[in-house]
Image (cartoon, grey):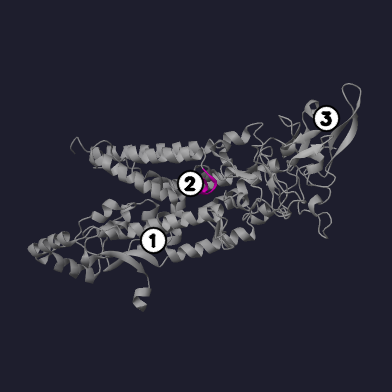
Amino acid sequence: MSRFTETFMVMLGRDPKKPEQVSEAVRQTMTLKYQDKDRFVQEKLHTRASHRPSHEWRNRRWAVLIAVNLLFVLSFWLDIQMLEGSLTASRFVGFHLIDLNSALQVMLAHKHIIVNLFIGTFTVFLLWVLLGGRSFCSWVCPYHLLSELAEMLHLKLVEKKRVTDHEFHRLTRTVFWVLFGLMAIVTGYTVFETLSPTGILSRALIYGPGLALGWVFLLLVFEVVYSRRAWCRYVCPIGLTYGAVGAISPLQVSFRVEHCFHEGDCRKVCLVPHVLDVTVKGRATDMNMGLGPDCTRCGLCIDVCPTGALGYEVKGLSRLL
Amino acid sequence: MSADRSSDGVPLDRARKARRKFLRSVGLAGGVIGLALLGYIPTTRAGGVRLRPPGALDESDFLSSCIKCGQCVQVCPVQAIKLGDLDDGFGVGVPMIDARRQACDFSCDAVQCILACPTGALTYKKPHSLGVRDGARLAALPILKAKEKDPENTLNLKERIGVARLAHPESCLAVQGKGFKGQVRGEAFKGRMRYMEVDRWKPIRIAEHPYDLPLCDLCVRECPVKNAIELRPVKGPDGQERMTPVVLEPCVGCGVCEMICPTEPAAIVVDAQAPWKA
């Protein structure tokens, strides 16, 4: 199975598999890496000692996320008309932008597509092909930010043994994606939009709060006390829609196995740790590997990695440079 | 085979965990889908019929085609449009108008909310596949009183969003032969309207525009559409000759009459999504 298909299947819910074959270069690298155990341990300790923990990418990302949402809010409040509408659909200085998942739900429910809807959807499709698909989640979605804060609280409580994380099967999200699509077709209503915390939060920020925020609050409580990042990990069809777009995106986080000590810090901070399966010892098949479509390009792993084995990459561009 | 292994050789503990995870996932799916489908309840509720912005498709088409972005809210000069909340079920984020609070007075002249809609949920021209309800089609494009003398004096609106109705004739000031003096709806009322003699492009608060009328004809006087409502003579309850507002076919259901009616509750109201009955 090609790496593309493999990572796509993993996004849909399959567990990552041990590779049957690794490239000759990787095999040699691994042999050299572990040839001298003492040297390996010393290098590891040295790297640890000299690693300056940073939140560089997280802070940049939060700044972008807040700026984008603020631009929506200010466009309406101050009537500066830069980015009118909300995250489900908007106009950026006049150009239609339409969220891919919302557009999909409307098309399935209404079964009639007008030109503006098509144009806006296509523009956003191109935009997120360029920008990495699920980067929408971590760099734009307001629920993602709240959920990250709830996650910090959850992890503190886990550390104190007050709560435990209950995992669900990742296939659940794919099932939801199909069910929400089917429900839109059958009922003729955009059923998902009723619950979507992304839409609810975006509208609440721009047009003022309402009862619907209570639902978002309940979701956050659920994530704090019961299941880490449950909505983004196991439910949200928006993530899967953008994930599918990101599958063909050149912008990705990539992993260079020769720099890795296989300690797994990255998998601990990751929203979608299955994409970092390549960082497990013996799982990488090539010297440089993209993490696949489910990666939200959030950069937490890049921040936490002490060796710089993970980094942003624009496919093809590095070869050009 | 040892006792702590299932028939396919998987350790029982792991099998049990996997089973629990599976059941949990089924529970999650059932729970979320169940909650989502609760959105059905308000859509079937009688009396929950909302007044939608001009150009809205029929209710179920409107709910399905609206992408819940609120661009219509943003362009409305009098902020008549608000978005539905969670108690509207599938109507979460869908635009609606509470005419008593703030009606659409067409002060934008062009029905800009329709122009703003990216999905055609508000539309100047319905696709052929969608029918028109009986009594929804306007006999002619409504003439906007504010621009009656302009070469292009009509609104591009082919269907009505509701119809006005004198719900409480007994409290109507005109029927009682009374006039009206002062601020309609009081000092605190935030509703706005465009008064051509004040400023064509800047709606002002109704509270800033007091009236002094020997006989109250506010609903007729302030109706933005030509020939949509008029005062006609009627025999009062005491046998005296009185006047009463009569709603006519060009009524589009904008709700200005409901907003401007000085009695509490309003004597004249708009029945949202109601058809015209001759």
Determine whether, in the image, residue B49 is placed left or right of residue B134: left
Q: Residue at x 38, y 46 (%)?
A: A147
In the rendered image, the quadrant that contains the N terminus of chain A is bottom left
Tell which subunit mark 3 falls on: B
For disc 1, the marked residue is A5
Q: In the image, which residues are magenta?
A: A199-208
Tell which subunit mark 1 falls on: A
Residue B256 is covered by the magenta coloring: no
Q: Main secondary structure of the magenta part?
A: helix
> Going by the picture, which residue comes out furthest to the left?
A38
For disc 2, the marked residue is A201
Determine whether, in the image, residue B201 is placed left or right of residue B218: left
Tell which subunit mark 2 falls on: A
Q: Amino acid at mark 3?
A: Lys
Q: CA distance from mark 3 to mark 2?
A: 49 Å
Density class for disc 2 (Cα within 10 Å; few <14, some 14-19, many ≥20) is many
Lower position in the chain sequence, tag 2 or tag 1? 1
Q: CA distance from mark 3 to mark 1?
A: 79 Å
Q: CA distance from mark 2 to mark 1?
A: 34 Å
Dividing the picture into quadrants, the one containing residue B201 is bottom right
Q: Is residue B165 visible?
A: yes
Q: Amino acid at mark 2?
A: Leu
For disc 3, the marked residue is B178
Dividing the picture into quadrants, the one containing residue B274 is top right
Q: Residue at x 70, y 42 (%)?
A: B206
